[in-house]
Image (spheres, rainbow, N blue to C red):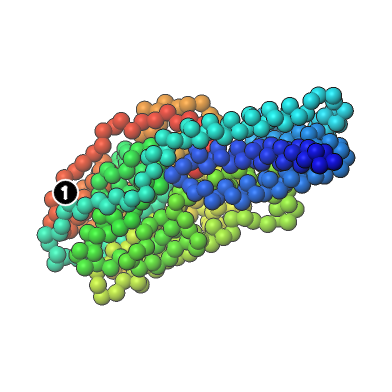
Amino acid sequence: MDKLKQSVVYKYLKVLLCLFLMCVYPCAYMYLSNIGETKIKVVIVPLFMFYMIAFFVFHIVIIFARDIYKSGTIACVFMLIFLNFNIVYKFIVSKIKINDIFLLVLFMFFWFVMSIYIVRSKIDYDLVVFCIIFAFGGLILFNLIMAVPKFTKMNPKKNVIKVEQYAKNKNNRPNIYYVLLDEYAGKENLQYYYDFDNSKFLNDIEKMGFNISNTTYNYEGILTSEIVPNILNLNYVTEIDGLQMNNLNLLDNPVMYRFFKDLGYDINIINHLGLFDTKDVNVLYETENADREKGVGAHDVDYYLIFNSAIEQIYQIVKKSQKSSSYDNYRNDCKNAINMLKNSCDYVDDKPTFTLCYMMLPHQPFVFDEKGQPIDDEKKVYNWETPELYINQLKYLNGHLEEFIHNVKEKDPNAVIVIQGDHGTRYAYFRMCDYAKDEYNAALETEKMQNALNCVYFGGKKIDIEGMSAINTWRKILNELYGTNYEMINPEKKFVYKWKYCVGANR
């Protein structure tokens, strides 16, 4: 009797291990593929959800199958399809039109037929369960080994960049407003990808006294995590194609902060998505519960794990029945950041002030139309195949930028205003990532995607910034205002990539 019980317990634990490894694998794969850009804790919730589903299915099936190994195999088949359901669904709907409810029913029917076959089969399912344990255990171990080089690159120490220049002229200290917009493209980029002419906005602000560069290229990359730390440190300090976490750590007390603090400036920040370091600065607005390490404008891996599974389709079906929107919070967050930017000149006191604003606009998700009306359609908010979605969100932003400029010029006419994009619209990149399109001409497309907005209001004075990168534009501004002697620097045009189909979170 004891041996029988021991045998049953052994079989039971063996099946539970089998199901556990099957649920662990996608979580381990996503985490290990994104080391340095996420934390292991983010996969715990999806893993728990997946395992509870597998545990429940197994115990329901065993009531009818009355065999531990067969029930475990049936539960494994269920989870194999369940964990990858949305990947299969997206592939099918790209080829033919099919109702998501119908596909879920088809999935359940297929699983039911497979279950009957397994129950009636004479196959040794002890061996099947062992093979599943061996296969998924081996895959997890393989991914661990492949991730070792990434582990060695992780650098928890924050690299503090030295301030190379100090101001010689400290008498002229105008208030400075720096607006950094994610994915705001330059003229060439917009014409190349969208055949769109942004001249109305550019001409309007030029009449207000802005100097505009139509040929600004931030050649070091096309990711925010590679570009923004360089700008705020006035030099090329990030590791291209390196770990995102290491690059973003360079935003902690960067050179630009320390330069202005040395001049006696207050620093105000509008911190959309929590991109910037907030120590010893005045936070005018910050996204609630922001986590910079998740990546700028990115979903973390827990999102992709759930998105790839049947949970996503079940959620979409429920949401459609309730006609609810999941983008209201994000939309309100954007509006709050925009409103704070427009009123930021009201938060300048007696001391000279450097106001830094980052907004993830006109970057996806596309949640605003041209007039600011909400977009909630899941087929649109991340859709790079429909050009007007990006363009309309850009037009919506343009109107608010003009209001911001009017407010500053009226209340703070001697101010300096810098409005830049970190990179242009990455149409080719997202077609690769989201639609698995063929590799593009890297030498041509990378440069097009690096063409970004670059506009400077210098108290109504002319300043030639044509063709300058964001870094060189700032070096020239500091030279003109404070008598520094920063040299113009440029990276070699070697940062050209062939992007592969990806599941990662970089933005």
Q: Measuring 66% from the left and 41% from the top, which residue is drawn there?
A: 20
Check the picture and name the quadrant holding the N terminus. top right
Of all residues, the one furthest to the front in this rendering is: 2
Q: Is residue 2 left or right of residue 84?
A: right
Assess disc 1: are there few (<14), some (14-19) or many (≥20) residues with their C-alpha within 10 Å of its C-alpha.
some
Amino acid type at mark 1: Tyr
Quadrant of res 497: top left
Q: Where is residue 292 shown, x and y percent of the image?
A: 44, 54
Tell me if I can see residue 358 in this picture: yes
Q: Where is residue 284 shown, x and y percent of the image?
A: 40, 67
Marks counted in the figure total 1
Check the picture and name the quadrant holding the C terminus. top left
Tell me if I can see residue 174 in this picture: no
Q: Secondary structure at mark 1?
A: loop
Of all residues, the one furthest to the bottom in this rendering is: 350
Quadrant of res 102: top right
Q: Measuring 48% from the left and 64% from the top, which residue is drawn there?
A: 336
Q: Where is residue 126 shown, x and y percent of the image?
A: 76, 29
Q: Measuring 24% from the left and 39% from the top, which residue is drawn there?
A: 490
Q: Where is residue 130 shown, x and y percent of the image?
A: 70, 30
Q: Is residue 35 above or below residue 482?
A: above
Q: Which residue is mark 1?
A: 486
Quadrant of res 405: bottom left
Q: Is residue 154 left or right of residue 160?
A: right
Q: Measuring 45% from the left and 27% from the top, which residue is drawn there?
A: 440
Q: Is residue 225 above or below residue 149?
A: below
Of 291 and 199, nearer the camera is 291
